[in-house]
Amino acid sequence: MVINNFLAGAHVDVTERTVSGGMHFQDSKRKVDYVLVYHYRKRTSHVGVGSPGLLHRPGSLAIISNGETDKNQPEQQQQQQGQDAPCPDTEIIHLGPLDVLEEEKWEQRNEFECNLIEAGLEIEKDVENKNQGLIFVRIHAPWNVLSREAEFLKIKMPTKKTYEIKEEEGIIQKLSEIWHKFTEPLQPKVPRKNNTRMKNLSYPFSREKIYLYNIQDKETFFDNAIRSRIVHEILKRTYSTKAKTSKGINTLIANNVYEAAYPLHDGEYEDESKEMNDRKLLYQEWARYGTFYKFQPIDLIRKYFGEKIGMYFAWLGLYTEFLIPSSIVGIIVFLYGCVTIESDIPSKEMCDHHNAFTMCPLCDKTCDYWNLSTACAIARASHLFDNPATVFFSIFMALWATMFLENWKRLQMRLCYLWDLTGLGEEEEHPRPEYETKILQKKSRTEKSKRISQDEDEKDEKEKEKLTWKDRTPGYLVNLASILFMISLTFSLVFGVIVYRITTAAALSMSTNESTKSNVRVTVTATAVIINLVVILILDEIYGMVAKWLTEMEIPKTEKAFEERLILKAFLLKFVNSYAPIFYVAFFKGRFVGRPGKYVYVFAGYRMEECAPGGCLMELCIQLSIIMLGKQLIQNNVFEIGVPKLKKLFRKLKDERSETKESNSNLSKQPQQWELDYVLEPFTGLTPEYMEMIIQFGFVTLFVASFPLAPVFALLNNVIEVRLDAKKFVSELRRPDTVRAKDIGIWFNILSGIGKFSVIINI
């Protein structure tokens, strides 16, 4: 472990450290731009000369930097430094021997951190941390590193030159002013530019043209999001030759060398201090349920979390806004059904007791003939959702889906312009650790084989650098077989519920209780839908894990390719799982029952089920409403709120138990920001958030003819969902790495496909 007398050559006691809100180094000047975390093994063994170990100097602070060594350093220490230290100008203190695995991890960490120092970063860590047996490695990027990497990454920064944005004139401008004045109470109270018509011209950062940029303070010119992004890029491409794979912090985390890596939040979000930061502002104006009626501060979200997350919330906000007109039309259609229910001729004829229409038995042997007037209530209820206005609503929703997608493309282009993403190209991505591992395994196998000629050697070398289709074929075959099996499993479970409905209906029809016999259809429908809902929720979780496992078998090269393939598999499986029972009721139930004297039987004595006298649309409405509402309520309350809180509570209890086993010497120390952020849940991506909304979009557009109130419930759910996701990002999750993105990626293609499919389904 390395020590550099960076701070005036003096060791600083941990308990006397200057409190800086946990956002800075010990000197309270240099920002903590990134944090690496790993567990250490506390040992009290004797000091072993030349044996690697953990630094163990009570009450001291380890500063690793690329600065110069103190000239007053003892000559003996400098000699030892020259022989054993892996970094220049450093001092090493050794402890007792570690086991082989821990020694390998120590060597990998040591080399990786030294390479970070060579890249220009500055590192600070506690030598002995009594808190939960953890070591927090704090990283700071000085100006020379920030400017160098900003130029390398071509990060656009605002220049001194400004230009005026032309606004619409005439009636458009007046309407815009009226709308802005009308919606003023709905605007979040976040800082805005004094003159929104003036915009700074952005230009990729260049050190040679630094005079172009309005740099008033080098410490604040790059905001925290950009600083953490730059450090993360360095971490991703830094080599560690002692690691099994070539490079990157992702490799080291995958090999458990480090436990976590994350940027810091901008302080606490609900402390009583008057000092305001972006996190606290987002919590007050965005992440509280009391602000549900306000617009989202999209620009501040983008500034704090990055463009990719900003795009998600912009899309979710537009989708929620578009649900307002569809909800209004849906309510009108429903009210039209309520008003015209008395004038509906088919239901009037069915409810007329003077017209005795005798119907054939619904089952063999035990069922008797029945009068059509007994289905009066079902017929009247069906008219609420099956009336002439439903045809108009189906056409309206097909057009609504198209209008929503077109408006999103327009908003997306506008955000790209405002966020300086117009010239953003595909950034070069580093290979995934799993991909590199497979490459190394392939190389080792190839080196063992005999080489026949020099030409074949060159060909082998080229093939060893990448995975060919031959290497991926086993994974593709397993993927195809597994997906077909999962789809077949879904259909089998749907068929199992159908059998349950048929057998249960036959069993209840034989009951001697008249009340039970008269409510057979309602009982069977309600219980079958609940079973379907439980099966869907369970399979959703299983299919999510299966999709990830199958994608890992394909060994995609980059994280982007991995994410896209995972999304396609998960969506295909969850699409079939969520909609298969509804498709059966909408298109297949009642189509294959046969006729009196020639019925179709599933098993001996069990006839295929028929639709209700008023049609299957009422049953489809019940099916859709229960599955849609149950899925949203359970997933929101249990999976999105309950499970993360339980994980956080479990981790907190575990850390408290670990803390009690440590010494009580540092009990008075206030937890720093990096320690508070470590307790939070790690960010795992936007795929679950998008997936939930895409499935809901399918419910709203595909089968809305059977349930006109679906947009209303989707709107109510999304008003809560926006604030729920906001609170989760602000208070429950570690701060994600900022990622630049000019669109929502493959999700738009899925939305477009659902929109086109909805036209066919509604027809």
Image: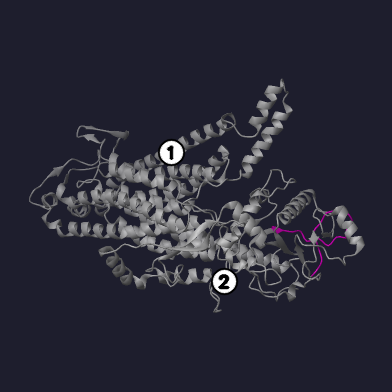
Q: Which residue is mark 1?
A: 487
> How far across and how far down the image is residue 446, in percent?
69, 29
> How far across and how far down the image is residue 224, in percent?
58, 64
Q: Which residue is mark 2?
A: 268
**Quarter occupied by residue 207:** bottom right
Q: Tell me if residue 644 is in the magenta stretch.
A: no
- Element marked by disc 1: helix
Residue 685, can we see it?
yes
Does 371 sit left or right of 49 as displayed?
left
- Above or below, 176 against 343 in this view is below
Classify the position of the C terminus by image quarter.
top left
Residue 520, can we see it?
no
Residue type of the residue flagged with mark 2? Glu
Does 5 sit left or right of 308 as displayed?
right
Residue segment shown in magenta: 38-58
- Element marked by disc 2: loop
Residue type of the residue flagged with mark 1? Ile
Number of residue marks? 2
669 vs 226, nearest the viewer:
226
Q: Residue at x 31, y 62 (%)?
A: 168
- Above or below, 615 against 327 in this view is above
Q: Residue at x 80, y 69 (%)?
A: 58
Classify the position of the N terminus by image quarter.
bottom right
Q: CA distance from mark 1 to mark 2?
A: 46 Å
> How far across and how far down the image is residue 629, in percent?
36, 56
